[in-house]
Image (tube, rainbow, N blue to C red):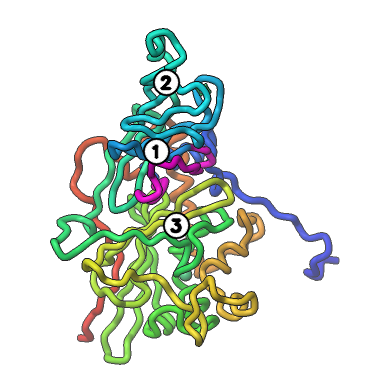
């Protein structure tokens, strides 16, 4: 007799197409077809730094001429980690026998070999290309002949003299920067607008603007480059708040500010960085007036504490995005979910993801990659006030 009790329940499975990040896996290869943020610009310094992205361990550094480099740690000679290397004018030098490599992996010196290494051209350190934008360093880890142009977005174009781009580096609303869970479960959360009403308002007190505390009229729409959610709320003054959030391929989320500090088109976009299958870091670039306090550093509970100051009991009393997404598991069990009517947006994100897995498996280019200079990509997200008729 199955009366629903826990005894003998299924252990459940995760869908590899929705969580894998390693090279050679379908999802890992799809992620590799796009520029991905690897670190803050400020993290690339003359002190080499271990970084991990898409389940690959790499070493990041910045040579004295200002060029950042991202190399395989294991020295091409006999395997010492370049984490212990010495950064010089235009290269990083392995501490063991002094082989030196440029940011494109070229071996520029072999001091123990005759004449600095006559055959050093044949020893290239595995490397990845980098592009700096808005305080972040992006890398492209896919096949060289499919490397796209670095995309431009309309919300970051034509910056005025009194404006700046500012990076916020936290997983959710002032929490830690790295969360011990898979990237997809935080990515798809953006198409789950009902949680704003329940989690951020009804359950935890107003974590967002109180005007987001009423039940919204929600709709979703899949378009070529992502999925959009629209939420309409009638405000006390008779106007309607038309809020638009979106996911963009492959791991970008564009959210209207939760504080309603900026009305109109949003001023920020974020990347859920897949460190590996079970760790995610979130970077957000904001366009703000110079010197303005950065948004998004939320507080929790009636004492307006930061996430880091909460006691264990307060984490239970005022859970937020971190608690709800991380507690789904390091990789959520897709087979044990019961997707319901409010999960239409989540289903759309997954369906579009699987469509693009197939495109890449069939030898095609996934949506949104361009290989020539193109116009800026137009984003849709924002908080729009619609006047009553
Ligand atoms: S192991 Fe790096 S130079 Fe020998
Ligand atoms: Fe949230």
As for residue 101 lying within the magenta part, the answer is no
Residue 173 rendering spot, x and y as whole percentages: 45, 69
Q: Residue at x 33, y 54 (%)?
A: 223
Instruction: Decide which of tag 2 and tag 3 comes sooner along the chain.
Output: 2
Q: Which mark is residue 33?
A: 1
Instruction: Decide which of tag 3 and tag 1 comes sooner along the chain.
Output: 1
Residue 188 rendering spot, x and y as whole percentages: 48, 59
How many angstroms separate mark 3 from mark 1 (CA)?
A: 19 Å
Magenta highlight range: 37-58
Instruction: Decide which of tag 2 and tag 1 comes sooner along the chain.
Output: 1
How many angstroms separate mark 2 from mark 1 (CA)?
A: 23 Å
Q: Is residue 34 visible?
A: no
Q: Residue at x 39, y 20 (%)?
A: 107
Callout 3 secondary element: strand
- The residue wearing badge 3 is 282
Specify whether tag 1 is near ligand 2 (CB below 8 Å). no
Quarter of the picture containing the N terminus is bottom right
As for residue 41 lying within the magenta part, the answer is yes
207 relative to 65, above or below? below
Q: In the figure, is residue 299 to the left or right of 327?
A: left
- The residue wearing badge 2 is 124
Residue 7 rendering spot, x and y as whole percentages: 83, 64
Q: Residue at x 57, y 76 (%)?
A: 310
């Amino acid at each position: 007799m199955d009366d629903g009790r826990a005894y003998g329940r299924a252990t459940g499975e995760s869908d590899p197409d929705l969580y894998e990040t390693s090279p050679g896996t379908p999802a890992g290869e799809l992620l590799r077809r796009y520029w991905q943020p690897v670190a803050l610009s400020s993290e690339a310094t003359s002190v080499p730094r271990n970084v991990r992205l898409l389940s690959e361990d790499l070493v990041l550094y910045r040579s004295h001429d200002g060029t950042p480099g991202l190399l395989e740690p294991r020295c091409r000679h006999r395997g010492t980690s370049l984490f212990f290397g010495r950064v010089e004018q235009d290269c990083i030098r392995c501490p063991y026998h002094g082989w030196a490599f440029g940011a494109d992996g070229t071996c520029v010196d072999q001091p123990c070999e005759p004449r600095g290494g006559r055959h050093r051209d044949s020893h290239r350190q595995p490397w990845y290309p980098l592009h700096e934008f808005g305080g972040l360093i992006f890398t492209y880890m896919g096949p060289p002949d499919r490397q796209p142009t670095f995309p431009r977005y309309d919300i970051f174009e034509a910056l005025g003299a009194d404006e700046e781009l500012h990076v916020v580096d936290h997983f959710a609303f002032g929490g830690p920067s790295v969360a011990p869970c898979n990237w997809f479960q935080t990515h798809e959360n953006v198409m789950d607008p009902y949680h704003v009403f329940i989690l951020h308002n009804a359950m935890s007190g107003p974590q967002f603007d109180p005007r987001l505390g009423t039940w919204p009229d929600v709709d979703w729409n899949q378009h070529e480059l992502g999925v959009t959610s629209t939420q309409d709320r009638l405000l006390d003054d008779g106007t309607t708040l038309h809020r638009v959030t979106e996911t963009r391929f492959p791991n970008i989320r564009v959210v209207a500010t939760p504080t309603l500090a900026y009305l109109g088109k949003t001023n920020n976009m974020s990347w859920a960085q897949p460190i590996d299958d079970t760790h995610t870091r979130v970077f957000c670039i904001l366009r703000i007036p110079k010197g303005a306090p950065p948004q998004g550093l939320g507080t929790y509970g009636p004492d307006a504490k930061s996430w880091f100051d909460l006691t264990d009991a307060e984490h239970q009393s005022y859970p937020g995005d971190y608690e709800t997404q991380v507690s789904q598991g390091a990789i959520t069990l897709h087979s044990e979910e019961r997707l319901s009517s409010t999960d239409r947006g989540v289903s759309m994100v997954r369906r579009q993801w699987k469509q693009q897995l197939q495109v890449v498996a069939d030898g095609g280019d996934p949506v949104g990659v361009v290989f020539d200079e193109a116009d800026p990509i137009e984003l849709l997200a924002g908080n729009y006030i619609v006047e009553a008729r």
